[in-house]
Image (tube, coloured by chain):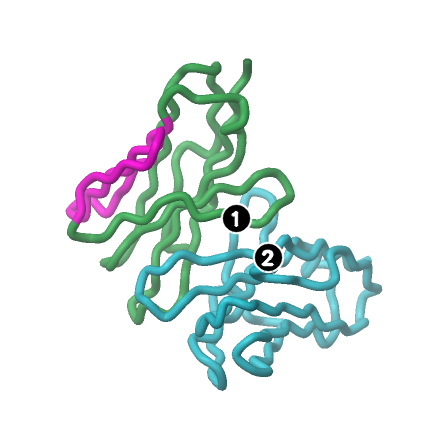
Amino acid sequence: NAGVTQTPKFQVLKTGQSMTLQCAQDMNHNSMYWYRQDPGMGLRLIYYSASEGTTDKGEVPNGYNVSRLNKREFSLRLESAAPSQTSVYFCASRGEIVGQKAFFGQGTRLTVV
Amino acid sequence: SQQGEEDPQALSIQEGENATMNCSYKTSINNLQWYRQNSGRGLVHLILIRSNEREKHSGRLRVTLDTSKKSSSLLITASRAADTASYFCATGNQAGTALIFGKGTTLSVSS
């Protein structure tokens, strides 16, 4: 049972380059999330998708776009990477029952130089 | 701004001691969850307490919730070196669709 799978695990980008972080879950969850984690800042919500076909901005959406491709997949795109986007990115998913626990991927460590 | 704020930011104790972490939040909630993160890994769910509950236990974990003070605490009893990790509280947004985390408490348990 894979749970939540993120790719890639590591990435180095040059300023201005673009890339897409992929996330897939096999638990038939409705809700999916993208977070970034920076030292001393905890996890901050970038975007989330409460169901297939919907996406909403979280706390720090600027500089990012997302696509809920289908129920399984939720991707995060950086159109023009900036050094301030150097971070560890986590994808998570959660079922439809209110309060159900979230499952996390192992993270993508992104460095923008 | 983040919904939950944990206190203290860092905590160092000896094995066998109890560890208490606190979480304060801003808006009314349906439930509050605690998660654990080992260094460099994804978060793992520990326990959920609903707004109509005051206390909940799971093994060596004890969680309390005071909705009048908008605060929760996580107690780990008889700590072990393996409990060394960061601990986060999480609450939902008002619509219940998003999951918002605090900044976390980093616990270090030395043997």
At label 1, which amino acid type do we have?
Leu
User: x%, y% of residue A90?
Assistant: 59, 58
What main secondary structure does the magenta stretch of the protein show?
A: strand
Q: Chain under label 1? A: B
Q: What letter labels the chain drawn in green? A: B
For residue A64, above or below residue B111: below
The reply to whether the magenta stretch includes residue B87 is no
Q: Quadrant of residue A5?
A: bottom right
Q: Chain under label 2? A: A
Report how far apart the C-alphas of labels 2 and 1 lie in the structure.
Answer: 8 Å
Point out the stretch of residues depicted in magenta. B53-76
The image quadrant where one finds the N terminus of chain A is bottom right
User: x%, y% of residue A53?
Assistant: 49, 86
Residue corresponding to mark 2? A105
Q: Are marks 2 and 1 on the same chain?
A: no
Along the line of sight, which residue is nearer the eye, B60 or B15?
Answer: B60
Looking at the image, residue A44 sits to the left or right of residue B48; the answer is right
Looking at the image, residue B21 sits to the left or right of residue A70; the answer is left
Label 2: few (<14), some or many (≥20) within 10 Å?
Answer: many
Along the line of sight, which residue is nearer the eye, A2 or A61?
Answer: A2
- Label 1: state its secondary structure: strand
The image quadrant where one finds the C terminus of chain A is bottom right
User: x%, y% of residue A8?
Assistant: 74, 62
Residue at image x 56%, y 80%? Answer: A68
At label 2, which amino acid type do we have?
Gly
Residue at image x 44%, y 64%? Answer: A94
Looking at the image, residue B16 sits to the left or right of residue B25; the answer is right
- Label 2: state its secondary structure: loop
Residue corresponding to mark 1? B43
For residue A41, above or below residue B9: below
Residue at image x 63%, y 74%? Answer: A75
